[in-house]
Image: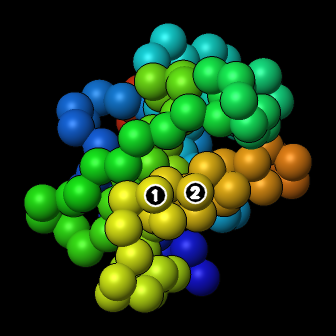
């Protein structure tokens, strides 16, 4: 079910030696300083930095149009928390504001649900 999204993130993430965790709504947490339990580390980051607070830095976002894949990455106030938005999720007329708000809401949902669907360990271990 998440295979396509996992493959998309593998192409998006620059640098093959990065550990990361993918949440069920498309948010990816890059783990720049991997700890022993990557899943727990990603969940803690999402608990702290994932929830959206409108009018505060936690509500800020930017939209990056992908060059090599269809869709967009929506950034957050934390540089290592990113959310993928597929073209299937928005209309053709959607602009960066619409895409960004969708990505931000997906991040907020991932921060509430905290459901990790994939972890990729830069140390050579892949876990589901």
Residue under pointer 1: 97
Instruction: Specify the quadrant that holds the N terminus.
Output: bottom right
Q: Which residue does the image show at 45% across and 24% down from the upper left?
A: 79
Q: Which residue does the image show at 12% across and 60% down from the upper left?
A: 67
Given residues 42 and 55, the one toward you in this image is 55
Quarter of the figure with residue 75:
top left
Q: How is the image coloured?
A: rainbow
Query: Residue 15: x, y in percent?
Result: 22, 32
**Label 2 secondary element:** helix
Query: Residue 20: x, y in percent?
Result: 50, 37
**Is residue 42 visible in this depiction of the protein?**
no
Given residues 45 and 107, the one toward you in this image is 107
Query: Residue 39: x, y in percent?
Result: 71, 36
Residue 74: numbered disc: none
93 lies above or below 67: below
Residue under pointer 2: 101
């Amino acid at each position: 079910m998440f295979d396509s999204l996992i493959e998309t993130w593998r192409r998006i993430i620059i640098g093959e030696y990065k550990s990361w965790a993918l949440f069920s709504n498309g948010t990816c947490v890059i783990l720049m300083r991997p700890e022993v339990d990557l899943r727990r580390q990603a969940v803690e980051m999402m608990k702290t930095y994932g929830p959206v607070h409108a009018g505060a830095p936690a509500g800020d976002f930017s939209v990056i149009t992908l060059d090599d894949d269809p869709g967009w990455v929506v950034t957050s106030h934390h540089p290592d928390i990113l959310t993928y938005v597929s073209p299937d999720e928005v209309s053709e007329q959607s602009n960066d504001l619409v895409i960004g708000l969708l990505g931000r809401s997906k991040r907020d949902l991932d921060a509430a649900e905290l459901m990790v669907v994939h972890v990729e360990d830069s140390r050579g271990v892949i876990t589901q």
